[in-house]
Amino acid sequence: MQRILSTRLSAHVGQPVRIAGWVHRRRLLKSVAFLIVRDAGGLSQVVVTAPEVRAQIEQLTEETAVEVTGEVVANAAAPAGVEVVAPRVRALGPPAEPLPFDLFRPDLAATLPTQLDHAPLSLRHHTRATALRVAAATVAGFRSTLDGLGFVEVQTPKIVASSTESGANVFALDYFGRPAYLAQSPQFYKQLMVGVFERVYEVGPVFRAEPHDTGRHLAQYTSLDVELGFIDDHRDVMAVVREVLAGMAASCAATAAVEVPDQIPSVRFPEALAIAGAPADEPDLAPAHERAVGEWARREHGSEFVFVTGYPMAKRPFYTHPDPARPAYSNGFDLIFRGVELITGGQRLHGYDDYVAALAARSESIEPYASYLDAFRYGMPPHGGFAIGLERWVARLLGVGNVREVAAFPRDRNRLTP
């Protein structure tokens, strides 16, 4: 008999079925017992009246893997309006050991460190599993939207010869006796691939040796990267951001709804500082400033998204294109979602001499970037792009305060296992 998932039981009323999953909960009443079986689709209720089967399930423990055969009958009070009666139950392995926390309760009553210590178990709880499903739906929406816009998915190296962001927050490693690093982003490679396909994207891990220990930073996270060529300036990139966000939101709408406006409001960096009540000479937006700008966008525009454009060049990577009218400021942007920076992007330099000058202005050597810069000798078009942190998006979408709660096996400055 073919196994039936809980989501398909209602189509088999009056028929014999075989289900399999984990013992989610047992309710042992005086005259009847209920066995709740959890599978990938949800919950199935099994009604036990036979004494020998009741004695059997009394010996089972929560999370033991089991198989149940029986007949499906309608019951409006049961999950999905059906239940399995006259069951035969077979354990598919040894009884599960006592759990460090209950998984059948609506909320996971364990501290976050405890959840992370027992991640293979805590991820079975519906709240943690839902976050991973939202992440999967997000990636599907990201890919399908960009495929529809003529982008090509690429895969780039994660072991690189030089740091991408010209900073110290990199993980160094020994690469057959030579120094190398885990990639902070696919930035260099996605730019080079613009010279091949014009429009590219990548879904992959990136690594940041962040000294922070906050609810918004991870040492490894999933980056959704986009780069496109033959643009006029960063506003063409921002238009693609809006389309991508709409596609991601549509894919997640069944679980976590958010409205992406047809026109996302935008403010220039000096105006954002004024909105946040920050000093005019601040070089960047602090988290409190981001929250203030997010509240302004919600209040004034009814939008949970807002672009901040024209950040000072001093706070942007060396490959950022300056604003021709204000060279001290960039043709770059951040997108703030519900008060937190979600996306960084902008127009890139595309001329070899401009890169040489940009590195010289920062007193950086050309040599570590030689293979990257070489491509700009051969006709690279004006281009730009952006990157989205997947875990940060999911956390904001679900209203979760710590990105570790939406990552399967998070890595931060203190955690390397499980």
Image (cartoon, helix red, strand yellow):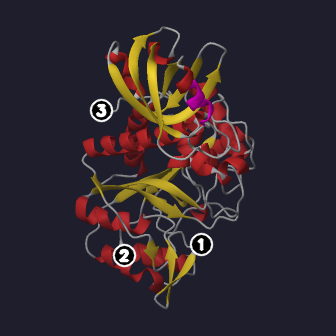
Across and down, in percent, residue 188 comes to 41, 68
Q: Is residue 307 visible?
A: no
Residue shown at 53% from the left, 43% from the top: 393
Q: What stretch of residues is rendered in magenta?
A: 54-60
Judge by depth and name the residue closer to the eye, 412 or 78: 78
Q: Quadrant of the C terminus?
A: bottom right
Find residue 2 and name its label. Answer: 3
Q: Amino acid at mark 1?
A: Gly
Q: Earlier in the sequence, mark 3 or mark 2?
A: 3
Q: Quadrant of the N terminus?
A: top left
Q: Which image quadrant for residue 55?
A: top right
Q: Secondary structure at mark 2?
A: helix
Name above or below for residue 11 compared with residue 391: above
Find residue 167 and name its label. Answer: 1
Q: Amino acid at mark 3?
A: Gln
Q: Amino acid at mark 2?
A: Tyr
Find residue 352 and name its label. Answer: 2
Mark 2 packing: few (<14 Cα in 10 Å), some, or many (20+)?
some
